[in-house]
Image: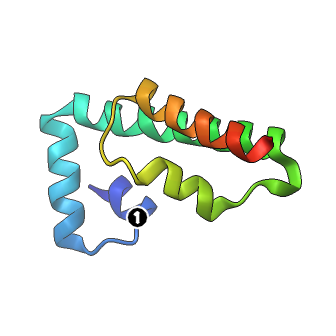
Amino acid sequence: MRSVSNYTAMDGEDNQYRGGSFITWPAQALSYKMGQIKILELRARAQRELGAKFDVRAFHNAVLDSGSLPLESGRMIVAARQAALAS
């Protein structure tokens, strides 16, 4: 539980729940991490390709507007919005 406390701004009760869920459902923790890595990759690519046109708020909207999606679907949505901005 200490590692959760060290890396989050949540209070003790939230940390206890989150740490406990990661211990009992390790696949959930893995899926969160995979999603984080993919979103960071998409952001770096958008920043690289759009340069000065990159807007972090627009990127976040592209990621969050469609709700919970499979990673590939999210990637396609972000790529489509990125292509529209690039042209």
Q: Which of 41 and 14 is in front in this view?
A: 41
Label 1 element class: loop
Judged from this view, the residue extending furthest toward the top is: 72
Q: In which quarter of the image is residue 82?
A: top right
Which three-letter amino acid code belongs to the residue tagged 1?
Thr
Identify whether 80 is placed above or below 13.
Answer: above
At a point 60% along the width and 64% down the height, the residue shown is: 57
Q: Where is residue 61 in the image (x, y as percent from the top left)?
A: 50, 57
At a point 40% along the width and 64% down the height, the residue shown is: 8
Q: Nearer the viewer, residue 32 or 1?
A: 32
At a point 53% along the width and 36% down the height, the residue shown is: 37
At a point 52% along the width and 31% down the height, the residue shown is: 75
Left or right, 13 with respect to 46, comes to left
Q: Which of 80 and 27 is in front in this view?
A: 80
Residue that badge 1 annotates: 8
Left or right, 29 with respect to 16, comes to right
Q: Position of residue 66 (x, y in %)?
A: 36, 47
Identify whether 33 is placed above or below 76.
Answer: below
Q: Position of residue 69 (x, y in %)?
A: 33, 36
* Count of labels in the image: 1
Image quadrant containing the C terminus: top right
Left or right, 42 with respect to 71, comes to right
Q: Quadrant of residue 25?
A: top left
Image quadrant containing the N terminus: bottom left
Q: In which quarter of the image is residue 18?
A: bottom left
